[in-house]
Image: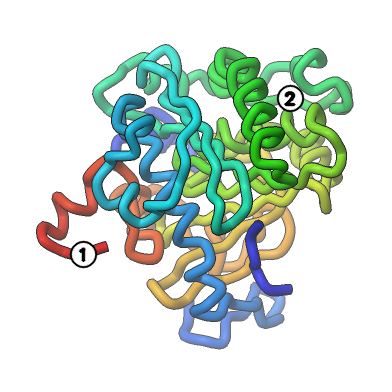
Amino acid sequence: MPWILPPAFTLLSCILLISRSAAALPYASEDGTTLPTLLSGEIAQLRPFTHYASAAYCHPDEIIDWSCEENCQANSHFQPFVSGGDGGAMQYWYVGYDAILDTVILAHQGTDIGYLFAAWTDACLFLQPIDDHLFPSAPLDAQVHTGFATAHARTAPYVSAAIQTVLDFHDASSVTVVGHSLGAALALLDGVYLSIHLPPEIAVTVIGYGMPRVGNAPWADFVDGLAPRLRIVRVNNGHDPVPIVPGQFLGYQHPSGELHIKAPDEWTVCPGQDNPSTECSVGAVPDILSADLHAHSGPYDGVWMGCGLESMLYPGREV
């Protein structure tokens, strides 16, 4: 089915918890079956959302003015509605409307190395029972990362109110939640939360870049069971170790939806949860020696995660 869509320090404290393969096209899984890949046009369809995720690292003042350099220029038609957070105790976040894609955008900032509080959130690895007020339909045995759950609970009421306002104002029927790193984990939690609390006719899509594991196997099964109303896309870049932490031996499990970038124009569709193929993250990064922390920041179809990072790496290049 076509994928048509309505900082190296990040998680460093978790790298020791990496859990436990690469040939040219066509791709093959461990059992010899060929894994599908995206066409160039399908990859390009994700690019606007990649810029939205990268823009979430910018200060809320830049977001509300939509003056965040290349990421704002790439989606110059975007209409910001509200932005918030302090980058520490509460990650930056923003909500607005994309008239071309006809979807409400919610974006969450990832981990900023300058804020130790955010790093602590990543390092708080324990699983906790899910909040039945935020996720009333979740199974009793579903558990999520304590730090991620705490960070999500701080913004959930503000985010939900803002999204409902924008949906009503634009008569929209789609919400897309994006984020990178910690922001991707928050995006997943918000995507599930919104799919439960918004009217059933509202479609919700989560697009997370370099997403760490968020919960246990019952949580992952619960997330998968929300399809087709909730759609999950997890974009993992090369040998980035963050998507395979916290480790499965700690009880963590990803939901389905992985896209694995082997090369700029080679994106593998990885079926199922934590696909062990060497063409997917679990198989491509078997141990710490195989990891490349720099891959966590990008590039994702040419886009680097971080406010102004692309212009610093490539000064003078037009978006």
Dot 1 falls on a residue whose secondary structure is loop
Image spot of residue 2 (x, y percent): 68, 73
Q: For the residues labelled 2 and 1, say whether their Cβ atoms are less than 8 Å apart.
A: no
288 left or right of 34 in image: left
Identified by mark 2, the residue type is Gln
Image spot of residue 187 (x, y percent): 58, 36
Q: Which mark, by number, is residue 87? A: none
Q: Using the image as rendered, state which of residue 104 and residue 297 is in the foreground.
A: 104
Asked whether residue 128 is in view, the answer is yes
Q: Residue at x 36, y 16 (%)?
A: 86
Image spot of residue 124 (x, y percent): 50, 19
- Mark closer to the chain start, 2 or 1: 2
Q: Residue at x 75, y 40 (%)?
A: 220
Mark 2 neighbour class, 10 Å CA radius: few under 14, some 14 to 19, many 20 or more: many
- Residue furthest to the left: 315
Front label number (2 vs 1):
1
Image spot of residue 102 (x, y percent): 62, 53
Q: CA distance from mark 2 to mark 1?
A: 44 Å
Viewport quadrant of the C terminus: bottom left
79 left or right of 314 in image: right
* Mark 1, residue position: 318
Q: Residue at x 30, y 35 (%)?
A: 9
Dot 2 falls on a residue whose secondary structure is strand
Q: Using the image as rendered, state which of residue 163 and residue 38 is in the foreground.
A: 163
Identified by mark 1, the residue type is Glu
* Mark 2, residue position: 143
Viewport quadrant of the N terminus: bottom right
Asked whether residue 21 is in view, the answer is no
Q: Is residue 60 above or below residue 252?
A: above
Render colour scheme: rainbow
